[in-house]
Amino acid sequence: MVKKDKLQADLEGLVKKWKDKKGNLIMILHSIENIYGYVPRDTSIKLSRLLDVPLARIYEVITFYNYFKLEPPAKHNVAVCMGTACYLKNAASLIEEIEKILHIKEGQSTKDGMFHLDVVRCLGCCGLAPVMMIDEKVYGKVKKSEIVDILSKYVKEEE
Amino acid sequence: MEKKIIYIRDTDSAQKERINDYFTLFSNELRDANLLEQVQLVKVADIGLYEKGVAVKIIPENIVYSGIKTTDVKEIVEETIRGGKIIKDLLCGKKSKQLRAVLKNCGYIDPESLEDYIAAGGYKALVKVLTEMKPEAVVEELKKSGLRGRGGAGYPTWMKWNFARGMNSPEKYVICNGDEGDPGAYMDRSVLEGDPHSVLEGMIIAGYTIGSTKGYFYIRAEYPLAVERVQKAIDQATSAGLLGNNILGSNFNFELEIRLGAGAFVCGEETSLIASIEGKRGTPHPRPPYPSVKGLWGKPTIINNVETLANIPLLIAGGGTKFASVGTEKSKGTKVFALTGKVKNSGLVEVPMGITLREIVYDIGGGIINNRDIKAIQTGGPSGGVIPQEFLDTPVDYENLGKLGSIMGSGGMIAIDDTDCLVDLAKFYLEFCVDESCGKCAPCRLGGYQLLQILKKISGGNGELEDLNRLKKISYAMQKASLCGLGQSASNPVFSTIRYFEEEYKRHIVDKKCPAGKCKALISFKVISEKCKKCGLCMKNCPANAITGSREAGYIVDSQKCIKCGVCFDVCKFKAVMKE
Ligand SMILES: Cc1cc2nc3c(=O)[nH]c(=O)nc-3n(C[C@H](O)[C@H](O)[C@H](O)COP(=O)(O)O)c2cc1C
Ligand code: SF4
Ligand code: SF4
Ligand code: FES
């Protein structure tokens, strides 16, 4: 859990940095998302007070953009690319495989909070299609048969 | 002697140490020839050639030698560097059909070094503009150059700038559109990451021309490295006096700031992008008023694509006439494409306008994987269309692609072969647009959804012939009645696949077959008993236990149980499983 007073301090710092700039809301939300991995509700409430904008307007923005999340992230984010190149190279079969192994569907997290599965569009390395990314690491030319091994590496790391 | 640069690279991926030997050899020869002062030797990470041995590129002449042996080094230094003569035997076999202008620095200079950019001729254009050119003269030069927007629509850049310049307002804005939403394209990312200062320079010149003092980079948050490099470039330019007050001693002031996109395709559209920078939901507004009249915070604003802006410095430095010497009648200069799909060498290519699609796919892309036949080329991503194989000899420019029912787009280019199903492809793009529709206007919100349902019905084996007319009617309505470019162009992939591949749709609808074997509901798997060696591998691997049989009796697929995963087809080593 995020400590209350730390949260307050972070937020005040952020707001101070951006306060005088027009159209700052999205940039502040980006910073919050970077710190916590999502935008916690109590942060939005505080932000609404500090910036003097209605909470509804903050939520209106958060929910419009795919990038902002309202739920805390899992330990490892598995993003499978379904951009055009990856789609043509059968990325769908990778997704199926991951869903089968982790017993989750796209957009969900495993019960133990270990993995979250996202389907994303073009990660910008189509030459390596099909591509998936776990956290910051890119896996290119992934074969369905390699997935078990890739995922289990992350589980082992935890032990 | 004019100052020269020798770029050197080992294009064989297997070699590791060899390049250092060559580097030493070259520097020794240059030293012996007393040329160290005039010639700079640079190891680069990419020289545009692959698996062609050690290669050098000599600048400014742009001579490329490949397959260089250690014994050739002395001759290169003596003949070419000192004597200015070309050694024919070393010239790289086929002259590359690429023409690197926008990408000329990418991979060659350190993108985090302002000095490198300046050494490569950077900021010369800005100096020229600030010291010798009035804003009108810049517009005039742009007009001569014929440069058109690289973000998709191909609007003449000079007109856009001239409108904004003519607006009487103390506050104006310049925006760089780095949202790059086409899900299969990464040209702008490469420029922002590989040569950020070129885009900065373009923006500063834009600011000077229209009379603006503030510019914004709008970059997708999915490109963290691009954001980092651009920020670094802004900081460097500011400390060097290239941004800020009284730039280079003139009375022109300009500052730049980055704003991040947050994952919404519609934010690539001008009016949504402006709403997003203003910190709001990125929903479009009707135009007019155009941004050049009423844009960011209600003030005159120009929005240009990354690649458009990166073209500005070289256009100004070399002059508009020179820029216009490359290209076709109405499309000038080069275009960067992200070539992907079923080509052998996928990657970024930069080509002169007017090159044919065939040259791009075959001469640069190396042809189709497994030497299969190409079926079509898709350009323009979800807003574009397909161009069938019979038009491969069409020269690439805005007009030609438009006439064929596609668009230049921002530069996605996908080669499609006969294992790709066009109904499925149309469905894929439509899913994207339906997902990304902001929902503000009904034609896009409802029309897109209906189109998708019909396509799903067809690929699911329940299509009827009347569906083709329905698709056409809805597509037409969306084109005419949607509020923004997203909805207006969302049906392009459907329209153009029907236009050229109606037969393929009919095979799905009438024969209930998917010729490419992509649409799951329409394919079935069968073990061909004559070819089957009775190894049992298919049965072992089938996740649905849909294959029964034994080593004596052979194997059969139970079509009721089969989930059409294709595993049996893939695992069979004897090609005894048939997909149809
Ligand atoms: C739905 C939609 C998405 C767009 N996405 C982009 C984009 O990602 N990058 C871009 O430069 N232009 C994009 N455009 C085009 C821009 O609205 C605008 O025309 C362009 O940035 C103008 O710059 P240019 O004249 O330099 O091409 C998009 C347009 C629409 C309708
Ligand atoms: S066309 Fe689509 S994306 Fe554009 S305004 Fe209408 S609903 Fe929104
Ligand atoms: S396609 Fe998949 S489910 Fe169907 S028979 Fe082959 S292995 Fe089994
Ligand atoms: S389509 Fe997957 S990386 Fe581009």
Image (tube, grey):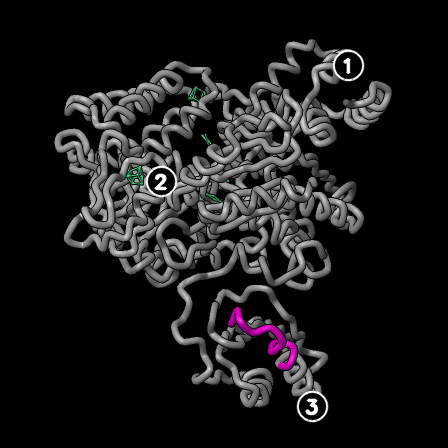
Badge 3: how crowded within 10 Å, few (<14), some, or many (20+)? Answer: few
Secondary structure beneath dot 1 equals helix
Secondary structure beneath dot 3 equals helix
Q: Position of residue B191 (x, y in %)?
A: 57, 50
Mark 2, ligand 1, within 8 Å: the answer is no
Instruction: Give the magenta part as a residue range.
Output: B12-21
Q: Disc 1 or disc 2, which is closer to the eye? A: 1
* Res. A46 mark: 1
**From this viewpoint, is residue B302 visible?**
yes
Q: Position of residue B116 (x, y in %)?
A: 69, 61
Q: Disc 1 or disc 3, which is closer to the eye? A: 1
Q: Which residue is tagged 3? A: B32
User: Is residue B433 depicted above or below B192 in this figure?
Assistant: above
Instruction: Give the residue displayed 28% in from the left and 35% down from the top.
Output: B546
The N terminus of chain B lies in which quarter of the figure? Answer: bottom right
Q: Which residue is tagged 2? A: B407
Instruction: Give the residue displayed 60% in from the left and 31% down from the top.
Output: B261
Left or right, B163 with respect to B481, comes to right
Secondary structure beneath dot 2 equals loop
Q: Chain of mark 3?
A: B
